[in-house]
Structure formats: structure tokens, C-alpha cells
């Protein structure tokens, strides 16, 4: 079943003996673990009713094969019991070690009312390297698909608008269900462009939005910019703006300040290590450059200005500035995009200092590769 359906099914049918949360989206898996434990222990864990093991932990790995035995032992203070095994795929197979499927089979055979074995793995439900979905279902386990959501129209959604996709719809639905506020799909898409596709970060952004909106029932594009995009005042986003506006002097000034004073990360801590600053700066520049390149390519194809802005998550009142930046030769932008690869390989190879790599990257994005850069730069 899709991860979004798990809470409803748990409420309707209660706990299975085995719950397998499979997929790369850690936020879905964590929410699934929490939802199952809440059903098993509605009053909370009084102590000893929840056992958590991680197959990646050398200290805990040896205990994983015997984890099912814990289900047969009732808690002293609660009617239910939950055994959670994270990353069971990391446990070596053979001997006394147990694979995910072996654990599920043992738990299904030793089913105890009110107890549940929860297996959380980054392996997918389908495709290469997936869990044994058919076997697990045959054992009576619930297999929950915790794959990342598409942040663009899915392959089967031909003809869909660029902003109408799984992730945007999920974000809009969560705003409605959790915060009782309306967020249109277009604005939800814009939020994913501002924040990214990480569901944990998006969930935090929705909470901020809801607090900012207050008693109003509908979230507007202006709310989005004021509450979430106020980070544009941060030096890192001023630098991005300077690069996209082709102001090399301002961009280099901001870059110098960043390496001399540091930058604040998402948690408010000041980052000063050059390699960490390089990662932060290039990530911001790369995301903005790719959006502008996509807009430039769409303009060249003659697409509607409104649709281009929507597709890149740009609110209407910021569309003109964005479109102005997109009025460039897409081929030229694509050529300069190679500078990101060169900067990263230079730093990771150890031959180019992080600050110098950033300076070269900024100059190349603004003015082109060295052969094309005016002598004054």
C-alpha cells in the first residue's frame, strides 16, 4: 500500500503481526513506525513495551535475529508490544543472522495479539534490490511503499501541468488535514521549489506557514514568500541573486564575506569550514541555475509566460523578474552548467581550494569560461 494510506488502514483494521516499511523516504518510514506504535500502545510506552534495534549498529546487530522472541514475552506494564528493527538488510545473512524475510516469517508464525514486528528498510518495494514483496504478502505482512514522491508529473501522468504532481498534492493535502488550511497545488509546488523535496523540511515549512497565516483559512502566494522565502535576505540567497543578475562584483564581494565570516545553516549554527561552505553555496547556486535554465528552454519553445513561472514555482508577482533572468541563450547556459561539475571535481580531488573553486564558479556562471571572460574580470 502507499505510505499515505497506512494511518487510515491501521485505524480501520488494527495491527498486523508484521509491518514492513520499505523505501528511500525516511520521513514516511518514521511516521509509519510512530503510527503503528500508537496503535499498539495507545497510552504510550510505560517502559519495556517497545524494543528498537538497528541492523547498522555493531552493538545491536547481534540481537536482531532473536528480536522475534521479544514478541512472545509480554510487557509487564502494557497489553501490547512493539519490536522495531531499522535497516534489517544490514544484518549479514547465514548462520544465526536473519534476513528481513526470515524475521517476518518467524514473527508471523509466532503472532501474539497486540504485538507487532516493524521492519524499516530503505530497500524499495519493487525493482532492483527490492524486498521480497510477494513472499511478505503471502506471510500476511503489510508492505508499505515508502518511496519518494515525484516532484514533477509522474511518467503515467502525461499531459499534466508541470506543477501538478504527487509531492505538491501531498503537501496541499497535509496542510488541509493537519493545519485545516487551504493551499492550492500551484502554491504547494512553489513551496517544494523553495524548500526542496525533503518531507521533513516541507512539514516544518507547513507549520511555519500555518502559524504565519493565523486564523485565515487560505494560504496565498504572498504568505509563501513572506514566511518561507524570507531566507532570500540571507547572504547565500543575495549571492544567488547577484549571479543570476550577472553582477559579478557584488557576487564576489558576497562570496568573500561568506568565506571570511561564515554562513548560518538551517539550524542556525554558523558554518565556517571552507568545504562545508562550498557545499552550501554550490547547492543554492545549482538549484537556482537549473530553474533558470529550465525557464530559458521553455521561453525558447514559445511556452506561455504564466505556465513557465508556475512550472518553476514562481509566484505571479515575482514572475517578471524570473522571466527576465530566463531571457538568455539556453545553449550558453547549458555550456556554463559544466562549471558545477568542474568545481566539485576540483574540490573533491583535493587539488583546488574550496574558496578558489567557488570564485571560479561564480565568474564562469556570470561571464563564461576563461576564454570568454573579459580581461577586466
Image (cartoon, grey):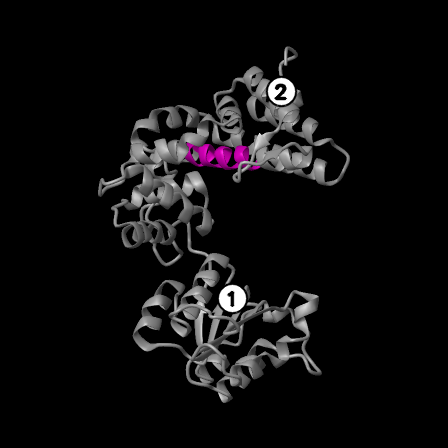
- In this rendering, the answer to whether 324 lies above or below 213 is above
| Residue 369 appearing in the image | no
Residue occupying image coordinates x 57% and y 76%: 100
The percent position of residue 69, horizontal first and vertical second, equals 57, 84
Q: Is residue 327 left or right of residue 216?
A: right
Label 2 environment density (alpha carbons within 10 Å; few <14, some 14–19, many ≥20): few
Report the Cα–Cα distance between label 2 and label 1.
46 Å
Residue occupying image coordinates x 47% and y 84%: 139
Q: Is residue 352 left or right of residue 179?
A: right
The percent position of residue 209, horizontal first and vertical second, equals 34, 40
| Residue 67 appearing in the image | yes
Q: Look at the magenta stretch and give its main secondary structure.
A: helix
Query: Residue 289 lies in magenta, yes or no?
Result: yes
The percent position of residue 347, horizontal first and vertical second, equals 71, 36
Mark sitting on residue 84? none
The kind of secondary structure element at disc 2 is helix
The percent position of residue 148, horizontal first and vertical second, equals 46, 57
Magenta part of the chain: 282-296
Residue 321 placement: quadrant: top left
Instruction: Please identify the quadrant where the C terminus is shown.
Output: top right
First in residue order: circle 2 vs circle 1: 1
Label 1 environment density (alpha carbons within 10 Å; few <14, some 14–19, many ≥20): many
- In this rendering, the answer to whether 22 lies above or below 325 is below
Q: Is there CB contact under 8 Å for labels 2 and 1?
A: no
Residue receiving disc 2 = 372
Residue receiving disc 1 = 124
For the view shown, which residue lies furthest in the top direction?
Answer: 376
Amino acid at each position: 500500500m502507499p505510505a499515505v494510506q497506512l494511518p487510515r488502514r491501521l485505524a480501520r483494521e488494527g495491527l498486523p503481526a508484521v509491518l514492513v516499511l520499505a523505501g528511500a523516504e525516511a520521513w514516511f518510514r518514521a511516521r509509519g513506525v510512530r503510527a503503528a506504535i500508537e496503535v499498539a500502545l495507545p497510552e504510550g510506552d510505560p517502559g519495556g513495551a517497545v524494543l528498537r534495534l538497528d541492523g547498522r549498529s555493531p552493538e545491536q546487530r547481534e540481537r536482531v535475529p532473536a528480536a522475534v522472541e521479544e514478541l512472545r514475552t509480554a510487557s509487564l506494564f502494557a497489553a501490547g508490544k512493539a519490536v522495531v528493527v531499522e535497516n534489517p538488510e544490514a544484518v549479514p545473512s547465514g548462520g544465526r543472522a536473519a534476513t528481513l524475510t526470515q524475521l517476518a516469517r518467524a514473527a508471523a508464525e509466532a503472532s501474539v495479539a497486540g504485538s507487532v514486528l516493524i521492519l524499516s528498510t530503505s530497500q524499495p518495494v519493487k525493482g532492483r534490490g527490492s524486498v521480497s514483496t510477494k513472499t511478505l504478502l503471502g506471510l500476511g505482512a503489510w508492505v508499505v511503499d515508502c518511496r519518494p514522491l515525484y516532484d514533477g508529473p509522474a511518467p503515467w501522468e502525461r499531459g499534466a501541468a508541470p506543477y501538478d504532481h504527487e509531492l505538491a498534492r501531498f503537501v496541499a493535502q497535509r496542510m488541509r488535514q493537519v493545519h485545516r488550511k487551504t493551499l492550492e497545488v500551484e502554491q504547494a509546488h512553489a513551496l517544494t521549489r523553495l524548500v526542496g523535496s525533503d518531507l521533513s523540511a516541507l512539514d516544518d515549512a507547513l507549520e511555519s506557514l500555518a502559524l504565519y497565516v493565523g486564523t485565515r483559512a487560505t494560504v496565498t502566494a504572498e504568505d509563501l514568500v513572506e514566511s518561507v522565502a524570507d531566507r532570500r535576505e540571507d547572504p547565500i540567497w543575495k549571492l544567488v541573486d547577484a549571479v543570476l543578475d550577472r553582477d559579478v562584483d557584488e557576487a564576489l564581494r558576497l562570496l568573500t564575506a561568506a568565506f571570511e565570516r561564515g554562513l548560518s545553516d538551517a539550524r542556525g549554527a554558523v558554518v565556517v569550514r571552507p568545504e562545508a561552505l562550498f557545499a552550501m553555496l554550490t547547492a543554492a547556486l545549482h538549484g537556482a541555475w537549473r530553474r533558470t535554465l529550465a525557464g530559458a528552454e521553455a521561453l525558447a519553445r514559445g511556452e506561455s509566460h504564466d505556465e513557465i513561472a508556475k512550472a518553476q514555482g514562481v509566484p505571479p508577482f515575482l514572475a517578471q523578474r524570473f522571466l527576465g533572468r530566463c531571457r538568455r541563450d539556453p545553449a550558453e547556459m547549458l555550456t556554463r552548467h559544466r562549471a558545477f561539475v568542474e568545481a566539485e571535481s576540483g574540490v573533491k580531488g583535493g587539488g583546488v581550494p574550496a574558496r578558489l573553486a567557488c570564485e571560479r564558479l561564480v565568474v564562469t556562471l556570470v561571464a563564461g569560461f576563461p576564454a570568454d571572460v573579459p580581461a577586466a574580470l
